[in-house]
Amino acid sequence: MFLMLCLEEDGLSCAPHRLTPVPPRGPESESVGCEYFQLPQTQMSRSVLPLLVTLSPALLFLLLPRGSMTQQELWEDYKYGRHSAEPLQHNCSWRCMVFTLQWPGGFCQSLYKETQCTIPENISSWTIHGLWPLHVQSCCTCWPIFYSDLQEVEEELLEFWPSLLKNKSCFRFWKEEWLKHGSCAACVEGFNSPLKYFQICLKLRHQFDLYRMLAEAGITPSCDRLYKVAELQQVLLPHVGERHEIQCVKDQQDRQVLFQVKVQLTRNLTVGCGHHGDGGLGPGPSPGHPCPPDAPLYYFPINHQEPWRPCG
C-alpha cells in the first residue's frame, strides 16, 4: 500500500478526519505538495501542523463506513455548508447573538493610534462590526474561509462591512470575524457556511439602518450639536428592542463620542433575547462603553481626508 504524506505550514488547527478532493484551482489556491488531495488552507496560529494521509480512491472507499459520504459529497458539504452540526455540537449551547454596528465618525476615537484609521470614500453610513453568538468564540478553526467564498457579496461587503484600519485588509477583517464568531454561529443551519453567515449580516444591516432612523428624528452628525443617550434610545427602541446598548468612547479632549450600537437577537434573528444566562451584552471585542445617561455625547461627522480629526 502506498501512502503519501503532506505537511502543511498554513494548515488546519484540528486534526483532519475527512479527505477532500482538490477543487478547481482559483487565484487563492496554493500547492501544498500533494498531487491528488489537499486540505483547504487557512492561517494557523501556534497550532500543531496537521498530517494528511492520502489514499487511493479505491482504498478510501473500502475504509469508509457504510453510509459514509462520498468524496464529492464531502467537498460539496464543505463548499455549500455543512449538513451535519457534529463538529460543533459542543459549542451550540448559546441562545443569543449580538449584532454590532459602528459609526465611522467615532471609530477613530477608539484607537490608541488614530492615524491607523481610514474611512473609504464610499462610506457615509454605519458599518458592520460583527455578529457574535454570546459567550462563545473560535469554535472551529478547522473551517476555513477563502476569498472566493465571498465574491458573490463582495461589493455589498465593501460598502457595509469595510475595514477601517490601514493595516488590515477587508478580507482579513472578514476572515477574522468568521473564524472567531461565524464558526460558532455555523452550528445553526441558516449560518452553516461563510457565504450564508455574511449574507445574513448584510440583511441585518439593511434592516437596522441606524443613520436613516436617527436622521428621520432630526439626529444627524454634527461637530457642535450635543445629544443625550436617552434621545437616541427613544428613537431606536421601536426598531432594535429593549435589549440594546448604545456605546461611546472618549476622545483626546475627554468628550463622549458615539461609537457603536449593539442589538441583541435570538438564534432565529428575532429582536431581543430573554434566554436565562444571556441577559447581558457583554464587553465585546471593542473599547466601547455604555454611553453615560447624563453626559452629553457627540455624533461626529465622517471626515474621509483626516478621519481621526472629524471636525478639523
Image (cartoon, rainbow, N blue to C red):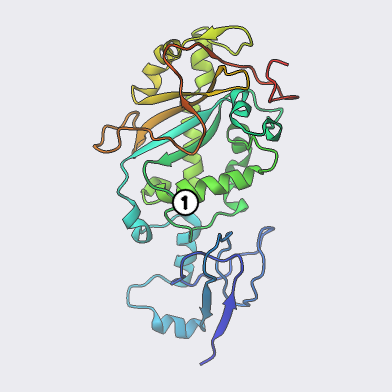
Q: Nearer the viewer, residue 255 or 62?
A: 255
Pinpoint residue 279: horizontal percent, then vertical percent: 30, 33
Residue 124 at x, y percent in the picture: 64, 23
User: Can the viewer see residue 94 in this picture?
Assistant: yes
* Residue 194 seen anywhere in this rendered image of the structure: no
Identified at 70% across, 21% down, the residue is 309
Instruction: Identify the residue at image location x=42%, y=46%.
Output: 191
Three-letter code, disc 1: Ser
- Most distant residue in the bottom direction: 1
The image shows residue 51, relative to residue 176, as above or below, that is: below
Nearer to me, 260 or 76: 260
Position of residue 172 measured from the top left corner of the image (x, y, whole percent)? 62, 47
The kind of secondary structure element at disc 1 is: loop
Q: Which residue is mark 1?
A: 193
The quarter in which the C terminus is drawn is top right
Where does the image place residue 197, in percent across and percent down from the top left? Answer: 47, 44
Residue most toward the left?
276
User: In the rendered view, would you say 25 is above or below 195?
Assistant: below
